[in-house]
Amino acid sequence: MSAPQATRTTALHAGAWWLWALGLATAASRTTNPLLLGLLVGVAGYVVAVRRTDAPWARSYGAFVKLGLLVIGIRLVFAFVLGSPIPGSHTLVTLPEVPLPDWAEGVRIGGRVTAEGMLFALYDGLKLAALLICVGAANALANPSRLLKSLPGALYEAGVAVVVAMTFAPNLVADVQRLRAARRLRGRPDRGFKALLQVGLPVLEGALERSVALAAAMDARGYGRSARVPRAVRHTTSALTLGGLLGVCAGTYGLLGDTGAGYGLPLLLAGLAAALAGLWLGGRRSVRTRYRPERWGPRACLVAGSGIAVAALTIWAGGYAPAALHPPAFPLTAPVLPLWPAASLLVGLLPAVVAPAPAPAGATAPAADPATTRATRTAKTAQKEPSQ
């Protein structure tokens, strides 16, 4: 077996990458410490650097990083112009304040800009930027079309819509990079606002062409067809799914609330079981076939488990060290890097070791499937027989 074929057959499950990235995003949502958020972004960036492929959609990570920086800038501008709810004693500048009517009490435009308010805005923007970067890491590492294979049949239509939405940003970035390279080859400027406007129309044209091609491919593959199931099965499916989701909501509320922890976990487990049973019954209505289904192996368990462990350890750290995870903006104090929460974030580096390495850029195509080769040979023989 050639090396590229081995890489294809041992490719990591796309769901494992998403669970890992969502675990990092959960950890980012539980802290405003800029040192921990910077470490979290560094963990995600290192794993992306060593484990992403050369596919066009894998180049979207840089765009998400730039989007995160833009979010931080917008948050600081809003805090500078509209003020901050955090009181402060260190005044940076005093802007002319616009008088507002009585019904806009609590909102101001201009006024005193404090260092504490800007620091609070910086912490808030860093958290949102880290969430976006974690989502960008999942987009760069996991092929959304491969993730669609693993969805249950009842969620196939919704999954297609989600996959199309998720691939919009990577395809848009790939189109912009391709058009900028073409402009450089023609001796035209590829930077600046004017160049971006000139690239916009070809990017829109490419998006429309992809939409038409996707619609034709979905129609050719029989998208939307459904099998007939008895009415009793349909009613049972609806009851199980709706009841299971209600049980999940009630169980989650019981776990998060101060009272109701005793019934929260059993109700949550019962709701999950009912919802999964409803999805399994609903999948009987969807007629689907899977070619080379995705395998969930030990490496996928380790990658997904590392992200879940990062989220769980960060949530646990919020119970015994809340001040370290949320440094105060007032009074002004330098953030401190807590030892054990920082060490728990390093667990997210496990995919850089256990995940399979991407195939080299110059690798040859994998060997053809024996059944496909036999079918092709039979078709060619059938075409030659009439001429003889």
Image (spheres, grey):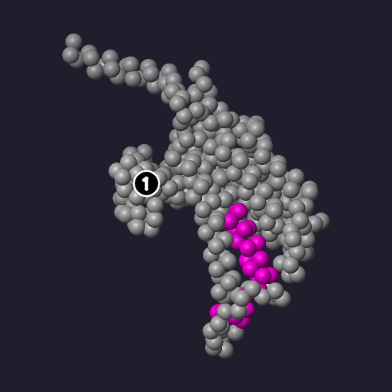
| Left or right of 75, for residue 177 | left
Observer able to see residue 314: yes
Query: Would you place residue 308 above or below residue 10 in this image?
Result: below
Identify which residue, 6 or 181, lies in the foreground. 181
Q: Residues within 10 Å of mark 1 (few under 14, many from 20)?
A: some
Q: Is residue 119 magenta?
A: yes
User: Image point 52% across, 21% down: which residue?
Assistant: 3
As drawn, the residue found furthest toward the top would be 388
Res. 217 image quadrant: top left
- Residue furthest out toward the bottom: 102
The answer to which of 94 and 306 lies nearer the viewer is: 94
Could you tell whether 388 is left or right of 94 in the image?
Answer: left
Residue labelled with disc 1: 180
Q: Residue furthest right?
A: 320
Q: Label 1: state its secondary structure.
A: helix
Q: Quadrant of residue 181?
A: top left
Q: Tell me where residue 331 appears, x and y as whole percent.
A: 75, 69
In this view, the residue in front, 331 or 30, is 331
Task: Magenta stretch: give its range.
Answer: 106-131
